[in-house]
Image (cartoon, helix red, strand yellow):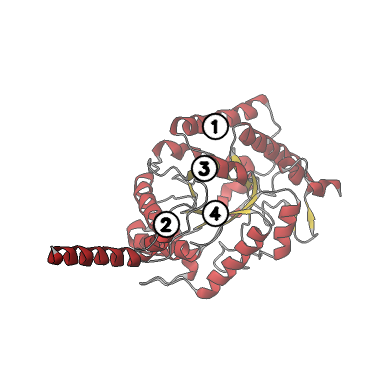
Amino acid sequence: MEVKSNSLIYSLLLALLALAVLPSCSNSQELEQQETDGPVQPKPEHPVDPFERNRALGKGVNLGNALEAPKEGDWGMRIEEEYIQLIKDAGFDAVRIPTRWNAHAQNSKPYTIESTFFDRVDQVIEWCLERDLMVILNIHHYNELMEEPEEHKERFLAIWKQVSEHYHNTSNDLLFEPLNEPHANLSAEIWNRYLREAIDVIRESNPYRTLVVGTAPWGGIGGLQDLSVPYDDRNIIVTVHYYNPFQFTHQGASWAGDEAEEWLGTTWTATKEQKEAVRADFDTVKNWADTHNRPIYLGEFGAYSAAPQESRESWTTFIRNAAEERNFSWSYWEFGAGFGIYDREKNQWRDGLLKALVPDSPELRK
């Protein structure tokens, strides 16, 4: 009996010792992080609802022609902190930051992103988040990936691994968009495969971050029918871009081809036919969204400055209304360059365009 009692006591002591060294329930998140290869985004207090995230995106503007240039400033636009304040004061809810990460990453393994570029993007994101503006961060103008998808797939995924780990601890008001406007040799079929792999990479360090996913080719609404979004990942917003009719929105734009000069003078006067064309396009998007139970973000729309100003304002007003009637959030292309709603030389808003986007903007009452 004595031997058995001692054995029992010894077993109990071992069990108590094992319990003492096990992590508590409160440290389960730390355990999860230790079991991964990198940092992991903290779990939010409440489940993330992508429809609520999309509503919060609301009215947005693209900070275009800056960080997606080969080098910021190459295209005449640099992001200044005062611009972020102007955007906030005008009544916008969010900004989209087109970013050419691939211009600042090594061409060979491990494809390291320049620390100085990370610092600059950090700065712009901080300016926005400090002012309670939501932020969408993407990979923009990765042209080599479009032309040679297989050759650049590994680099594309490595860039996202670095970006997602770098921002794993940033506010959930930062959203990731894996790639802007897949096109050329990056077909819809290939894009669907790369998208899934990119999402897997991002989810390793950001399991709760809302993602924004676009279509091939060129982010257009026609690509929705070929887009494959992982069904089991519901924390995703789908984005489309809209520049129809192209001859109107891109008249005089040098990158739109030689014929763009021939389009100069094209108007958009809200005729019945013009309005019905937009409604039909947006209803197609809405029907797809309802069928797939996904929120929609109109990530780009705008008319180039060479278009007649009155037509630009009419078109912009109608597109914004059409999006809001269907519960799409939206982001105008763009703040202060060729499509810009802000005149950086005169340091003033283009009131007609601002009114088209934010009719009750406090800036219009000054």
Q: Residue furthest top?
A: 272
**What residue is shown with label 4?**
172
Q: Amino acid at mark 2?
A: Ile
Residue 191 is situated, as x and y percent measured from the top left of the image, at 38, 49
| Tag 3: amino acid | Asp
Please tell me whether residue 263 is drawn above or below residue 336 in the rendered image. above
User: What residue is drawn where x is 19% and y is 62%?
Assistant: 8
Q: Are marks 3 and 1 in contact (CB under 8 Å)?
A: no
* Residue at figure coordinates x 63%, y 58% from the top left: 129
Q: CA distance from mark 1 to mark 2?
A: 32 Å
Q: Amino acid at mark 1?
A: Asp
Q: What is the distance, in whole Å, between disc 4 and disc 2 at their CAs?
A: 14 Å
Image depth: mark 3 or mark 1 in front:
3
Instruction: Pick out the residue farthest to the right.
Output: 366
Answer few, some or many: residues within 10 Å of disc 4's Cα (few below 14, many 20 plus, some between 14 and 19): some
Label number found at residue 281 = 1
Asked which quadrant contains residue 243, the reply is: top right
Decide which of tag 4 and tag 2 comes sooner along the chain: 4
Which residue is nearer to you in this view: 18 or 192? Answer: 18
In the picture, residue 18 is in which quadrant? Answer: bottom left
Q: Earlier in the sequence, mark 1 or mark 2?
A: 2
Q: Which residue is mark 2?
A: 202
Q: Amino acid at mark 4?
A: Asn
Q: Does the residue at mark 1 contact the one at mark 2 (Cβ under 8 Å)?
A: no
Q: Position of residue 271 (x, y in %)?
A: 68, 27
Q: Earlier in the sequence, mark 3 or mark 2?
A: 3
Mark 3 and 2 residues: CB-CB less than 8 Å, in contact? no
